[in-house]
Structure formats: structure tokens, C-alpha cells
Image (spheres, helix red, strand yellow):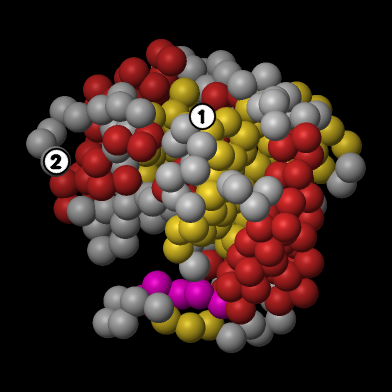
Amino acid sequence: MVFDSNLNGELAVFAGRLADAARCETLPRFRARATIYNKAGALFDPVTDADREAERSLRRMIEAVYPGHGIIGEEFGALRADAEYRWVIDPVDGTRAFMCGAATWATLIALERAATPAIGVIDQPFTDERWTGSAGGAQYSHAGNARPCETSGVTELGNARLSTTDPRREAYFSADEAAAFAALAAKTQVARFSLDAYAYGLLAIGELDLVAEASLKRHDFAALAPVVEGAGGVITGWKGEPLGDCASGRVVAAATKELHAAAIDVLNAAPK
């Protein structure tokens, strides 16, 4: 197989088929009082049948079409994780939003080559929105109408619209991380919360300018990088390191390299 990261290439088209299949499992269960399970014991880490059944469906499709590819999924772990090509899937990123009926959850699908994300899909089924990214660029589609993605071009923190999923230190941030995020938010124009992966899609079409988070795992961020970068943005760890090396899952995405550099300066001004 010849690798092609073009948005119209075979693998990108298959990634779209995976997103379509996930919709068949998630949409009927959304706002339908889905059963919620806690998979973390004393801590609350919710999962629903939508998460599990969507991942099962995607795994079956990958095994049938690309049996030599690896799979890393949030719900059922890794299979052939050392394969050159591997799919990284999060069937419902934002299960808390899903269980509250908020349409900010998303299905995340990434294809990695040599452990580097090459194709990414962020799909919001209820609003019928999809972002697809690769080295060739990024595309946004809504209700069948598609257009190229382009970030806002904002370069200064004072003009930036910032987001994180939950700014509390009791949630995804440590106390030091929460303080660093608060310092960053104080320098921006506005901050909005609880958007999960949807925030990165908004950044890719110029509706947000900056996202900073912590505690993300590979299935949370692998699909985001091709979309953000394909739209002209920057996404790294809090110290500017590649995503796979980011300590404690700290991720910062920005519309421009200038805004990214300014955000990193603030996030690293205090010890963490």
C-alpha cells in the first residue's frame, strides 16, 4: 500500500467511513437516557454503551479492511501497537457532555504512521459537523457543505478567545496547572469551558484562538494535530515539545506561532 495523506486519498476516505459508522452507534443513544457506567472505581470516569459499541464497530471495520494495521482505542486498549500504521480512536470524546445532552462531544479518529499522526478526524454527529486534517490541509464540512479550514490569525493574547474543558484543579488540572491556566486566561479576551475536542475544531475554523489542557491521553490528542496543523495552527505540549512527549498530557493549541509562543511563556512562568 502506498501511503497517501491527501484528504481525498484512500486512507482519509476510510477514516470518514469510520466516522460514519460511529454515528450509527452514538446518535441513537444521544439524548436518549443512555446508561452510564463508572469505569474508575472511587473516581468518576463515565462510559456509556455509545462509547463501547462505537469502538467495537470501528475495530471490526479496521480488522476487515486493514488487518495489518494497529489499533489503539480508549475503551478496549491496544492491538498491534508497534505496527507502522495504527488507528487511534476515541468513540466519544466528552462523555460527560454526552451524558448531559450537550452537543460538544466528538468522535476522534486518527491514523498514525511511525507513531506520528498523519490523518485526523473530529466528528460531531448531532450537529452534522466534521473536520478532517492531514499534511495537505484541513477541511470542515457541515450538512454536506465543505470548505477549507483556516485559523483566525490572532497573534496577541489580549485578542485571543481561549478554551479548556474544565479549569478546576479538582478536574483535569493539578493545583499548579490550574494556577498557570488562570494566569493565561487573565491575559486573554474571553474564556469558554466544557467544549472537549470540539474546541479544537472551532480553533481550526477561526472561532477560537487558543486551547490549553492537561491530562490528555493519546486517544484524546492524536486526531487533533492533523486538523489544527492542517488549518495553519500550532499544537504541542506546554513546553513546546511534540505531543507524544508532553508530560502529564499537557497540550496547548494556538491559531498562530506567535500566539502559541506567548501562551507557552505564561504557562511556564511558574513551576509545575
SS at circle 1: loop
The structure residue drawn at horizontal position 24% and vertical position 41%, both measured from the top left corner, is 247
Q: Position of residue 226 (x, y in %)?
A: 57, 31
Residue 45 in the figure: left or right of residue 192? left
Residue drawn 30% across the image and 27% down it: 241
| On-image quarter of the N terminus | top right
Asked whether, in this view, residue 145 is left or right of residue 180, the answer is right
The reply to whether residue 268 is visible in this rendering is yes
| Distance between the alpha carbons at the discs numbered 2 and 1 | 24 Å
Crowd class of label 2 (few under 14; some 14 to 19; many from 20; radius 10 Å) = few
Q: Which mark is residue 112?
A: none
Q: Is residue 192 above or below residue 145?
A: below
Q: Is residue 227 left or right of residue 245?
A: right
Magenta: main secondary structure equals strand
- Quadrant of residue 24 within the rendered picture: bottom right
Q: Quadrant of residue 16?
A: top right
Residue at horizontal 31%, vertical 62%? 171
Q: The C terminus is located in which quarter? A: top left
Q: Is residue 148 magenta?
A: no
Q: Amino acid at mark 1?
A: Asp
> Mark 2 — residue?
272
Compare marks 2 and 1 and give the one earlier in the sequence: 1
Residue 258, image x, y percentages: 41, 13
Residue sitting at the far right: 144
* Kind of residue indicated by mark 2: Lys
Q: Which residue is mark 1?
A: 209
Frontmost residue, 54 versus 211: 54
Report helix, strand or loop for mark 2.
Answer: loop
In magenta, the rendered stretch is 44-48
Q: Residue 69's spot in the image, x, y percent? A: 59, 47
Q: Is residue 141 above or below residue 150?
A: below
Q: Residue furthest left?
A: 271
